Amino acid sequence: MTYQIAFKNAYLASRSSAAKYRRELNDAVRNGEKSVLDFSTVESISDSFADELFGVFALQHGVEKLVEYALITNANEDVYRTIALNIHRRLSPTEKSAA
């Protein structure tokens, strides 16, 4: 079974809204469902949104589980770059010790 997460806004910037999506992703994983995250309407995301959704999830569950359970679709290059950068920052030993 697959769980769909479709973003409605062109600009995703709120850490609190990212936390809501992360909880949805966590629920899907707990139920053994893969999630499709559809970024077709999204032009850009903030670092705080990417960190809260993807960085925190990767820290809690590991990158492997993120890759296994979250399929990012229809994202532009800038969105992919922001997601990757924030996962890297969150998991980097120097970032963890600075926090």
Image (tube, rainbow, N blue to C red):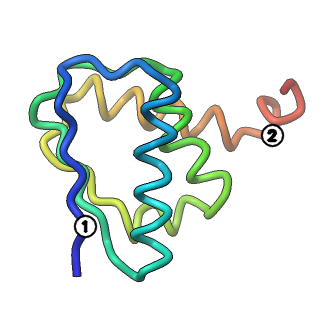
x then y, percent, for residue 11? 26, 17
Q: Quadrant of residue 67?
A: bottom left
Q: Position of residue 72 (x, y in %)?
A: 26, 50
User: Is residue 26 or residue 36 the one in the foreground?
Assistant: 26
Q: For the residue labelled by badge 1, is the local secondary structure a helix, a strand or a loop? A: strand
Q: Amino acid at mark 1?
A: Tyr
In-image side of 41 versus 86 (left or right)? left
**Would you name the residue on which mark 2 appears?**
93
Measured Cα–Cα span from mark 2 to mark 1: 32 Å
List the residue tagged with mark 1. 3
Looking at marks 2 and 1 on the same chain, the residue that comes earlier in the sequence is marked by: 1
Position of residue 17 relative to residue 27, above or below, is above
Image quarter of the N terminus: bottom left
| Residue name at image x 21 percent, y 37 percent | 7
Total residue callouts: 2
Point out residue 43 in the picture as x, y percentages from the top left corner: 18, 20
**Given the image, on which type of amino acid does mark 2 rest?**
Pro
